[in-house]
Image (cartoon, grey):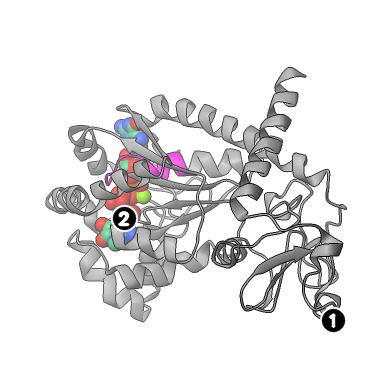
Amino acid sequence: MASRLRLIILGAPGSGKGTISSRIVRDFKLKHVSSGDILRANVDKGTPTGFQVKSLIASGQYVPDELMTRIVLPEVAGSSGWLLDGYPRTLQQCKAMEERNINLDKVINLNVPFSVIINRLKYRWIHPGSGRVYNLEFNPPKKLYVDDLTGENLIQRPDDREEVVLKRLKEYEKQTKPIIDYFASKSLLATYTGETSDYLWPLIRDDLEVDVKKQAALAPAHLQEVNTEPVTHTGQQFAVDDPRRVRFVGMSKLVNKNIAMKLVHEDPIVVAEQRVVCSSSAGPLGHPKIYINIDSNEVHTCGYSGRRFIRKKFYDEAKHGKSITYNQYLDELRKQEQKFITSKVNN
Ligand code: G5P
Ligand code: MG
C-alpha cells in the first residue's frame, strides 16, 4: 500500500526499530532513513564524518546534535513519505525539525523491557551494505553469517558488546526518554509495549492502515475543487491523491502573514520570492491553483498567476470577496473535512 505518511520510530537500542522499520517500509512504501545506518556507512567509507563519529559510536555515546541534523534531515527533504529511525533522539534534534517545519503524522514508540534487549543484541548480525538486520535466534540468515540477498558476509556491530550496550541504554534513558513526553504533548505519540517484534508488528500495521485510509479520505475532498493537473510545466508531478496539492484549496482569502508564511514553508511548494508572490497548491509559479500574495501588511490569496497578480495590484476585495481570518479558514476546512468523512462513513 503506497502512502505518504511521515513517521518517526523511537525506542531503546535493540528494541526492534530496524526490524519493524523494514516491515513498515516494505508494506507502506516509505523511504527508510536510519541515522545509525547513515553513520555506519560514513565510518565504512572513511569519510571525515565517519572519522569524527567512529569512536563515539563504538563507546555508545551520542553524536553531536548539529552533525546529526546536518546529515539526516536532507534525506527527508523532497520525499513525501518517509520513516525516520534513530533521529531525533534529543530535544535539540526535535527542535531542529520544528525549526525546519518538518511535519509529522505519527511517532511510533517501541516499549520493550531492557532485560529482553540485552539478550537480543548478543545475537545480532548485520549486512553492512544495506543495514539489513539478522538475529541468530529470532530471524537467522538462510546461511550462517551470510546476507540472504547479496551473499555477502555479515558482521557484528562494535557497539553491541555488552558493556557498550549498557552505556547506550543509559544514554537513551537520559537523552531520549524526554522526547517521548515532547511528542506526547503534541498528540503524535503511539506507544506499543511488548517483548517481541512479531507481537508488536500487527498492532502497528493495523494502526498505520487506518492512518493511510484517513489520509486518502481527506485528500479527494479538496481535490474535487482542483483542476487535476498532475504534471506542471516544469515537470513537477503531483499524484492526484497527494495531500500537498490540497493545501489552501477552498480558501479564498487569508490575512495572517505569519501563519501563511509558516504554511508556505511547511509545504513542498515553490516560493518565488518571499514577501512578494508565493505559489501554492498544485505546483510552481505559473501553474498553481491558488496564489498567496504577501505584501507589507497582509496576506491574500487569489487564483491569478504571479505576474497578473502583481499587475492587479495585489488583491481586490471588491472582486474577490471579503477577507477571512486564518482561524475562520481553518474552521471552514475542518467542517468540510468532517462533512466528507461523514459522507464516506455513511456510504
Ligand atoms: P542506531 O544504529 O540507531 P540504536 O542503538 O538506536 O542504534 P539499534 O541497536 O539499531 O538501535 P534497533 O534498530 O532498535 O536497535 O533494533 P533491531 O536492530 O531491529 O533489533 C535488535 C536485534 O534484535 C536484531 O538482531 C534483531 O534481529 C533482533 N530482534 C528484533 N525483534 C526481535 C524479537 O522479537 N525477538 C528476538 N529474539 N530478537 C529480535 O545508533 C547507533 C549509534 O549511532 C549514534 C549513537 O552513537 C548510537 O548509539 N546515533 C546518534 N547519536 C546522536 N543522535 C542521533 N540521532 C543518533 N543516531 C545514531
Ligand atoms: Mg537500528
- Whether label 2 lies within 8 Å of ligand 1 gets the answer yes
The quarter of the picture where residue 287 lies is bottom right
Q: Is residue 21 left or right of residue 259?
A: left
Above-or-below relation of 208 to 344? below
Type of the residue with mark 2 = Arg
The residue closer to the viewer here, 7 or 279, is 279
Which residue is under mark 2? 89
Identify the residue at horizontal 38%, vertical 78% (top origin). 47
Q: Which of the two labelled residues, at mark 1 and mark 2, occupies the earlier sequence position?
A: 2
Element at badge 1? helix
Indicate whether 13 appears above or below 159: above
Q: Quadrant of residue 311?
A: bottom right
- Span of residues in magenta: 12-21
Against 218, residue 91 (above or below) is below
Q: Could you say where residue 38 lies in the image, as x and y percent from the top left? A: 41, 64
Identify the image quadrant of residue 282.
Answer: bottom right
Identify the residue at image location x=78%, y=72%: 285
Residue type (three-letter) at the residue carrying disc 1: Arg
Where's the C terminus, which quadrant?
A: top right
Mark 1 and mark 2: span between their CA atoms? 49 Å
Q: Residue farthest to the top?
A: 346
> For numbered disc 2, what is the local secondary structure?
loop
Q: Which residue: 64% across, 39% down?
A: 334
Q: Position of residue 98 (x, y in %)?
A: 43, 60
Q: Is 13 colored magenta in this rendering?
A: yes
Q: Which mark is residue 311?
A: 1
User: In this orientation, which residue lies closer to the viewer: 94 or 39?
Assistant: 94
> Visible in this render: residue 137?
no
